[in-house]
Image (cartoon, rainbow, N blue to C red):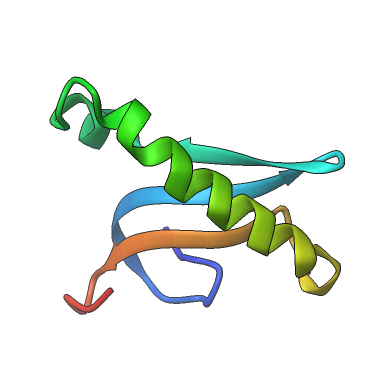
Amino acid sequence: MKNIAGNDVSIFLYRFELRGNGIDFVLNEVIAEDMYPDIDEKMKPLVHACCETLLRYRHLSVGNTIMDGNFLVSGYG
């Protein structure tokens, strides 16, 4: 699998996808299972702020994924 920059990915963490006039936050469910029980509530402000910022740049996106977070095969992320 490759990220939006074209790098080989070993583990997908999250991504922000353009959907209609908004943005969806997609979290790797396997990783989410290992998080704290209340992590959804704690992450909401961060995800909301990222979505608001990314909406300003949606016109520059060439695909559906506007931002992603991954561990790369090379060990860098």
Q: Nearer the viewer, residue 27 or 9?
A: 27
Image coordinates for residue 46, horizontal then vertical, percent: 44, 49
On the question of residue 27 being in view, the answer is no
Q: Nearer the viewer, residue 65 or 73?
A: 65
On the question of residue 13 being in view, the answer is yes
Residue for point 53% across, 77% down: 5
Locate residue 52 relative to residue 77 in the image: left or right: right
Q: Nearer the viewer, residue 5 or 55?
A: 55
Residue for point 86% across, 42% down: 21
Compared with 37, 17 (above or below) is below
Q: Dividing the picture into quarters, in which one does residue 57 lie?
A: bottom right
User: Residue lying furthest top in this view?
Assistant: 37
Residue for point 33% across, 49% down: 13
Q: Dividing the picture into quarters, in which one does residue 24 lie?
A: top right
Locate residue 15 relative to residue 38 in the image: left or right: right
Image coordinates for residue 60, horizontal then vertical, percent: 80, 74
Q: Quadrant of the N terminus?
A: bottom left
Locate residue 50 relative to residue 55 in the image: left or right: left
Q: Nearer the viewer, residue 30 or 40?
A: 40
Image coordinates for residue 42, horizontal then vertical, percent: 31, 36
Compared with 20, 73 (above or below) is below
